[in-house]
Image (cartoon, helix red, strand yellow):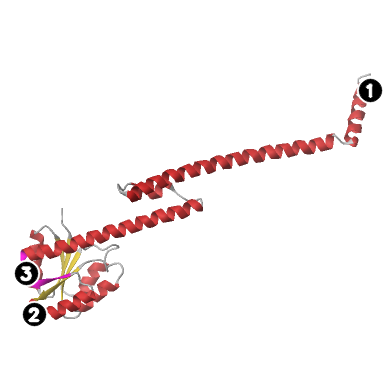
Amino acid sequence: MSQGHLLVVDDERLNRMVLERALTEQGYSVETADNGHQALALLKGHTTPAFDVVLLDVLMPEMDGYQTLACIKADPALAHVPVVVISALDEMDSVIRCIKLGAADYLPKPFNAALLHARISASLAAKRLRDLELEYLEQVAQVTAAAVAVESDSFVPGSLDGVAAREDALGHLARVFQRMAREVRTREELLQRQVRELRIEIDQARQAERVAEVTETDYFQRLRSQADELRRLMNGG
């Protein structure tokens, strides 16, 4: 299993080959780009960021590392992807500039295998922590939205299944919320059924009351007496 998916951006073919080989030997999957435009096309060519870390050379033709880094950090869908600047030791001013632009770290040339692995591991750890934070915040938003849905009687219990599968406090909260929401819905359905039954009883009582109002009038009583008398006459009485 790959330890992470990396994008190497360097206009020097030899540098790309050396980095790709070293990273592959360390268990990473690697793609390469020879300029900033190509790197951005690869980064934006997926609905979700496909790369865990970008290794970015500073000095490149067409679109240099500064411009590429600025574009990455300006894109909300890419801004959280760690960028490790590839730089020679005599380019420290450039490294500092990149750090200010949002780079997570830098990788000096020539490459040291142990340092390369340490830099990338640190960036991957930071990204995974950030991904967990984003996932947590998104799931907190799901619970909040579920509370609003309960108020509007549009809550779907299954909508929190993903959050309820967590083993932490948020997962416990989601499970409790689901149970309470089901209980509320059950009570509401019972109440609605009782209201419907009560309305039927009220309608029946009203109908009986109307019938009684008619049958108890003097006019109705005279009609009934006349009908009874007519039946007696017809029966020979």
Mark closer to the chain start, 2 or 1: 2
Element carrying mark 2? helix
The answer to whether residue 80 is magenta is no
Q: Which residue is drawn at 68% across and 37% down?
A: 201
Q: CA separation, marks 1 and 3?
A: 124 Å
Query: How far is the residue under mark 2 from the one under mark 3?
Result: 14 Å
| Residue furthest front in the image | 169
Q: Residue at x 50, y 52 (%)?
A: 151
Whether residue 169 appears in this view of the structure is: yes
Quadrant placement of the C terminus:
top right
Give the total of numbered labels.
Answer: 3
How far from the left and from the top, in percent, is residue 99? 19, 74
**Which residue corresponds to mark 1?**
233
Q: Nearer the viewer, mark 2 or mark 1?
A: 2
Q: What residue type is disc 1 on?
A: Leu
Compared to 137, does 225 lie above or below? above
> Which mark is nearer the camera, 2 or 3?
2
Q: In this view, does 142 lie to the left or right of 219?
A: left
Q: Return the residue at label 3.
A: 111
Magenta range is 105-113
Crowding near the residue tagged with mark 1, few <14, some 14–19, many ≥20 C-alpha atoms within 10 Å: few
